[in-house]
Image (cartoon, grey):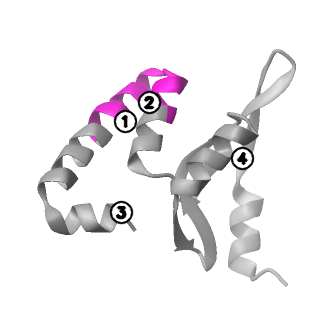
Amino acid sequence: MVPADRRRTAELADVRVALVRGVAERLEFTTDGGALDCDDYGRERFDQVASRAVSVELIGLPVLVAAIEDLIDLKRQAGRAMDMHDVHLLTLVQDEARQDPAIHRLSER
């Protein structure tokens, strides 16, 4: 049984599908926590990204979070203005992590 707060979050999600060439390539969710885009880069690419991802708990559920290198690559591929801004910010974070051994160890988990 799904707890009420998780059902509520799912019910409040505004799902929009962008159709490109007749195939759903992006799901865009608007949630209480902010926007979440899910892009379809294919099974092989998913497997590559998932193999380097870190598992974190989100509202009591395990969620894979892509490694920063993959996030940068995926956002470059998306190519939207907001993604390119994120590439800039993620690159700064990546550079800082390389200079700080404590942060670097966290990124290697």
Q: Main secondary structure of the magenta part?
A: helix
Badge 3 local density, few (<14 within 10 Å), some, or many (20+)?
few
**Rendered location of residue 27, percent (x, y):** 71, 39
Q: Which image quadrant is residue 1 in?
A: bottom right
* Residue position marked by numbered label 4 in the rendering: 14
Q: Secondary structure at mark 4?
A: strand
Q: Which residue in the protein does label 1 denote?
A: 86
Of residues 45 and 71, the one nearer the viewer is: 45
Q: Nearer the viewer, residue 36 or 63?
A: 63
Quarter of the image with the C terminus in it: bottom left
**Could you say which disc has been placed on residue 83 in the image?**
2
Circles 3 and 2, Cβ within 8 Å, touching? The answer is no
Name which residue lies at 74% across and 44% down.
15
Earlier in the chain: of badge 4 and badge 2, it is: 4
Extent of the magenta region: 74-89
Q: Give yes or no for residue 76 being in the magenta stretch.
A: yes
| Residue 19 percent coordinates (x, y) | 79, 23
Of circles 4 and 1, which is in front?
1
Question: Which residue type does callout 2 highlight?
Answer: Asp
The image's mark for residue 108 is 3
Question: Foreground mark, 4 or 3?
Answer: 3
